[in-house]
């Protein structure tokens, strides 16, 4: 089982929007060196929505190749078209991903029974560990704990990313499925709290810029050191907040560029961080000792 800090890796791009393969390699090496415990390739933060299918698969393959077994790689393969999710998941398995992360189908708002059938179909088609991903603020549909409990019966489904930031929901979910699925936070600001409740780690945006700190935070929480984890999280809160002054991944991509780890590219309809917000992110990076 993967525990600790799992970075939701940005996909570095050149100014023209093409994938920056050299800096992608650098980022993977950076995370291995800095203590990140696993890597999510082409999730929300990796701009999955604007990568073509061949690019999507190529990024996963490159991350797997560069990680070279030093860290597990979880491939973002979610889609609101079940056949597309199956295709991406098949490709992720082919190129060597250790698991796949499937966001709840977005925009078309399937009912709970549709969510069950969607994930069952992916599991039936591809024998690879499947992580559920519930983020209703982005998808427009909330995968309920009871639905997740039903899906926990599927052998290929081994984990869930719970990104609501609601600790009552997290507690309910861990009580229901914590002995069957690994539960991961998808909300940096409350991640340590979810881990203290019995979660196994955090799938993190902040880890893109502060991998060692996020690893330490997760380890403190996993060790049950609540006071120390709370204190460190309070010190990181300015940074957590800065990563969401605009829609993810706009701020974190600007921050990674500011750190000299990536170019400036981001794909429409996303745009570069508003100039009026850049000083806020810059200050957070400085306060954390990152730049």
Image (tube, rainbow, N blue to C red):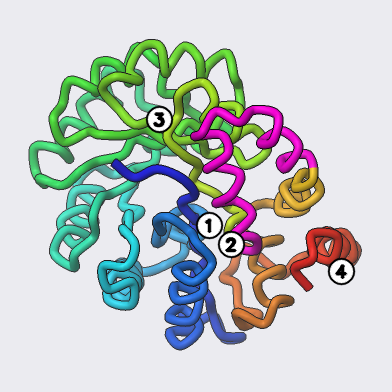
Residue 275: assigned label: 4
For the C terminus, give its image quadrant. bottom right
Q: Residue at x 64, y 32 (%)?
A: 190
Instruction: From the image, tell me which residue sits under label 3.
Output: 183
- Of callouts 3 and 1, the N-terminal one: 1
Side of 125 where 165 appears, left or right:
right
Q: Secondary structure at mark 3?
A: strand
Q: CA distance from mark 2 to mark 1?
A: 10 Å
Q: Residue at x 69, y 36 (%)?
A: 228
Report if the CB atoms under discs 2 and 1 are less than 8 Å apart.
yes
Instruction: From the image, tell me which residue sits under label 1.
Output: 45
Quarter residue 115 falls in: top left
Question: Measured from the top left, where is residue 47 in percent x and y?
Answer: 49, 61
Nearer to us of marks 2 and 4 is 2
Task: Confirm whether residue 166 shows in the render.
Answer: yes
Neighbourhood count class around disc 1 (C-alpha, 10 Å): few under 14, some 14–19, many 20 upward: many
Q: CA distance from mark 3 to mark 4?
A: 37 Å
Report if the CB atoms under discs 3 and 4 are less than 8 Å apart.
no
Q: Is residue 230 magenta?
A: yes
Instruction: From the image, tell me which residue sits under label 2.
Output: 208
Most foreground residue, 86 or 240: 240
Q: CA distance from mark 2 to mark 3?
A: 21 Å
Q: Residue at x 68, y 38 (%)?
A: 189
* Magenta residue span: 208-234
Q: Secondary structure at mark 2?
A: helix
Q: CA distance from mark 4 to mark 1?
A: 20 Å
Side of 142 where 77 appears, left or right:
left
């Amino acid at each position: 089982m993967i525990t600790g800090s799992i970075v939701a890796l940005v996909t570095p791009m050149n100014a023209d929007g093409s994938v920056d393969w050299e800096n992608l390699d650098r980022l993977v090496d950076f995370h291995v060196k800095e203590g990140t415990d696993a890597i999510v390739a082409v999730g929300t933060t990796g701009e999955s929505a604007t990568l073509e299918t061949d690019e999507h698969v190529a990024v996963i393959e490159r991350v797997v190749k560069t990680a070279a077994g030093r860290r597990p790689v979880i491939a973002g393969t979610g889609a609101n078209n079940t056949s597309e999710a199956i295709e991406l998941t098949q490709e992720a398995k082919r190129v060597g991903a250790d698991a796949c992360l499937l966001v709840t189908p977005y925009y078309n708002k399937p009912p709970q029974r549709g969510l069950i059938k969607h994930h069952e179909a992916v599991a039936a088609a591809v024998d690879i560990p499947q992580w559920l991903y519930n983020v209703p603020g982005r998808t427009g549909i909330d995968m309920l704990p009871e639905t997740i409990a039903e899906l926990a019966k599927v052998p290929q489904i081994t984990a869930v990313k719970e990104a609501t930031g609601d600790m009552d929901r997290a507690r309910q979910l861990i009580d229901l499925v914590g002995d069957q699925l690994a539960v991961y936070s998808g909300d940096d600001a409350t991640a340590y709290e979810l881990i203290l409740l019995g979660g196994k780690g955090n799938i993190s945006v902040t880890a893109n810029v502060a991998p060692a700190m996020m690893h330490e935070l997760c380890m403190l929480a996993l060790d049950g050191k609540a006071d120390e984890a709370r204190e460190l999280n309070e010190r990181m809160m300015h940074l957590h907040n800065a990563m969401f002054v605009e829609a993810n991944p706009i701020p974190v991509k600007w921050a990674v560029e500011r750190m000299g780890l990536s170019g400036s590219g981001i794909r429409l309809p996303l745009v570069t961080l508003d100039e009026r917000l850049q000083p806020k992110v810059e200050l957070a990076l400085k306060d954390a000792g990152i730049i």
